[in-house]
Image (cartoon, helix red, strand yellow):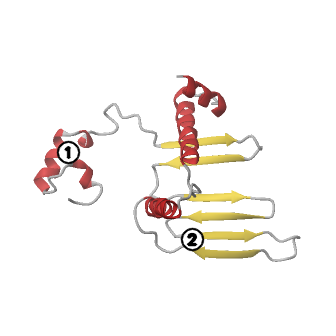
Amino acid sequence: MGSWPAAVLTQDQTEEGINKALAEGPYGRCVYRCDNDVCDNQVVLIEFKNDVTVSFNLSGFTNKISRTIKVMCENGEIRGDDSLNQIEVTKFASNATDAFEQRIIHTGQPQGGHGGGDVALMDDFISQMEAHSNNSRSSITQSVESHVMAYAAEQSRITGEIIDVDALKSRLRNS
């Protein structure tokens, strides 16, 4: 079997097989001339109950296929960039005359899919089984919560409405 993305097209990884899959299958269609409605750019604003706000930006129009995060706090900020495999921690100066303090943590090259997340989830699962523990680093409850947030963002994108996540979860439970 070939590598991604050709591997999702067909099991026949010859040039002829790939060309045939593109000509006859859904992956050969022009995204601008078909029923494709996949979101290619999006900005989501989230306000949590504790008044923490988040802005999530997604763009398919970049040459850098990666994820970045920036957490801004009162006394500093944290930035992460999975394409650089690093986390940058900056502690702000207590006054305008002192220099700020910055630390860069190199996380190393992740192994496996989803930036190493797949392997980490399996390692965590095996550790739980060996220790007969229920203390997961990523519980099903956390996973469902993040998926509900993504669903709410998509509903907001489609309808143009503000989505109350608690009300959405209630509707989903009762449907």
Give the percent coordinates (x, y) of residue 16.
10, 52
Disc 1 packing (10 Å; few <14; some 14–19; many ≥20):
some
Q: Which residue of the protein is positioned furthest toward the left in this rendering?
A: 16
- The residue sitting at 64% across, 64% down in the picture is 79
Quarter residue 92 falls in:
bottom right
- Is residue 64 visible in the rendered image? The answer is no
Q: Secondary structure at mark 1?
A: helix
Give the labeled residue for mark 1: 22
CA separation in Å, label 2 and label 1 = 38 Å
* Tag 2 and tag 1, C-beta contact below 8 Å: no
Give the labeled residue for mark 2: 86
Give the percent coordinates (x, y) of residue 48.
71, 42
Give the percent coordinates (x, y) of residue 52.
74, 47
Quarter residue 6 falls in:
bottom left
- The residue sitting at 64% across, 30% down in the picture is 162
Screen quadrant of the N terminus: bottom left
Which of these two is toward me, 116 or 98?
Answer: 116
In this rendering, which labeled residue sits more in front, label 2 or label 1? Answer: 2
- Is residue 20 visible in the rendered image? The answer is yes
